[in-house]
Image: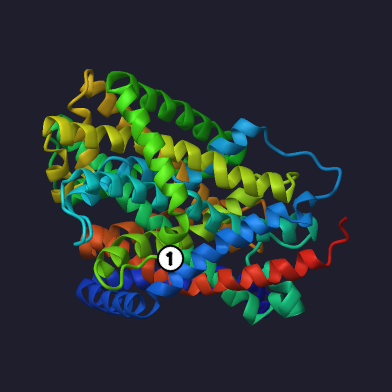
Amino acid sequence: MLREYLRREGVFLLSAGIILFFIGFGVTRPDLLDAGSSAVHAAILDNFSWLYLISVFFFLVFALALALSRYGTIKLGYDAERPQYGFFGWIAMLFAAGMGIGLLFWGVSEPLVHFLQPPPFIDAASPDAAAFAMRYAFFHWGIHPWAIYTIVSLSIAYFSFRRGMPALISSCFYPVLGERIYGAAGKMVDVLAVFATVFGTATSLGFGALQIHSGLTHLYGLSSAISVTIGIILIATALFMASAILGVEKGVQVLSKFNIVLATVLLFLVLALGSPPYVLNVFASTLGGYINNIIDLSLQSYPFAGFEWSRDWTVFYWAWWISWSPFVGLFIARISRGRTIREFVLTVLTVPTLFTFVWFTIFGGSALHLELEEGAGIAAVAGEDVSLALFAFLEHYPFAGILSLAAILLLIVFFVTSADSATVVLGSLTSGGGLVVPNYKKVVWGLSLSAVAIVLLLTGGLDALQVMAITAAFPFMLVMIGLCYTLAIGLSQEKVQ
């Protein structure tokens, strides 16, 4: 009986034990945790930065090749199935889970930091630096992250809905492992997925909590103590766990639709109150530069000048997206049943990306306009505290208080939807891929996500969040390369015209 229980709950017990050990170690020996994670992080960056760049570019090419091939007509489900969710609800959920907090955190601050601190071959705070900043913001948040999500979600959706296997990362390796996916090898793959998901999501929750705290401090003079950030995480934890227990239909979908509407309203208010012609020129120019240079951007690490900049930004982002990919991939797979591979890939790669481009243009482009034309000093704020840049930017607009409150509300709901989705996905990954997850597992994973975020913030703040994202992502990047191979084998067995 005990053996059967351990076999059934092996992934849950092993992954929860690892995370619990990490939390305990971080609480009792934060200095050793910081030193150890920093050493692993440095070794990965020194030796494998090139692999992140090549792998992510390969994921993009592979996803597009599948969509445009004869396999594009294959449905993620039975041939006669219709999509489970309407188009708007589908887009809202995948966007809220896939980008949410990051857009608010980096939408203003990233272009300004690139503008102020570009690689050494570009003059800082110059028009060239502004163009470079916008182009790289598009690159870091554009089609490549969604290609990463696409590989994982497409693999899970195909083997689960088309082949009738459990909705697990390990199921995707059936073409090479066979029945061994139900043994130790398959369980280790799922444990790696859980590990990456916990630390990738905790990184985002840490970003979100820092920015909510900065906004409240900026507006109301709230204490800047780290205890307040922890309090914000604890309150948000209660909210997202309640939403997770309600389920996708009542929880995530409703919140996601609300969020996409609120985000769009905030977006167009900032555009209307700013300089629309200037912003639209920034959009056209940046989009052209992005498209013309996409291959160079994809593989450029600046080894002769600017390598540190590339590691700190591009490699970090690729690792962050990879660490998010098990959670986002499984969540997107769950809400995408009934769509063809072509519809799935092309929609996931383009629709959220276009919205993201518009977001960075309106927020980042407007911030650069204020900086270049009016000397607003927002870049200096971003250089000192990236979590405060959004609120410093909104101070230059009418109704700044209302806009800032709307941004904080948006952050809170994005926090809840991201953590909510991650909690459900972690529960599913550790319940054999089942759609019905016991509430006790949702509670365990919800508390674990928040505890890991708190430990990382106490250990090293923003730097610790970034270090752990890169460290956790590396083994799962190798798993993703394997997913491409097994998906290709699986599709080659389909009878299509």
Query: Which of the 4 image quadrants contains residue 7?
Result: bottom right
Tell me which residue sits at (34%, 40%) in the image: 104
Provide residue 129's location: percent of width, then percent of height. Answer: 23, 48
Tell me which residue sits at (21%, 61%) in the image: 121
Tell me which residue sits at (47%, 59%) in the image: 295
Residue 438 falls left or right of residue 36: right
Residue 427 falls left or right of residue 334: left
Provide residue 448's location: percent of width, then percent of height. Answer: 41, 59
Q: Which part of the image, by quadrant, shows the C terminus?
A: bottom right
Crowd rating for badge 1 (residues with CA inside 10 Å; few <14, some 14–19, many 20+):
some
Residue where numbered disc 1 is placed: 299
Of residues 252 and 238, the one drawn nearer to the viewer in this rendering? 252
Tell me which residue sits at (37%, 52%) in the image: 204
Of residues 377 and 249, the one drawn nearer to the viewer in this rendering? 377
Image height of 327 relative to 284, above or below: below
Residue 11 falls left or right of residue 1: left
Circle 1 SS class: helix
Residue 347 falls left or right of residue 165: left
Of residues 483 and 112, the one drawn nearer to the viewer in this rendering? 112
Q: Which part of the image, by quadrant, shows the N terminus?
A: bottom right
Query: Which of the 4 image quadrants contains residue 297?
Result: bottom left
Query: Which of the 4 image quadrants contains residue 70?
Result: bottom right
Q: Which residue type carries mark 1?
A: Leu
Image height of 244 relative to 468, above or below: above
Let me know if residue 231 appears in the view.
Answer: no
Provide residue 109's location: percent of width, then percent of height. Answer: 25, 44
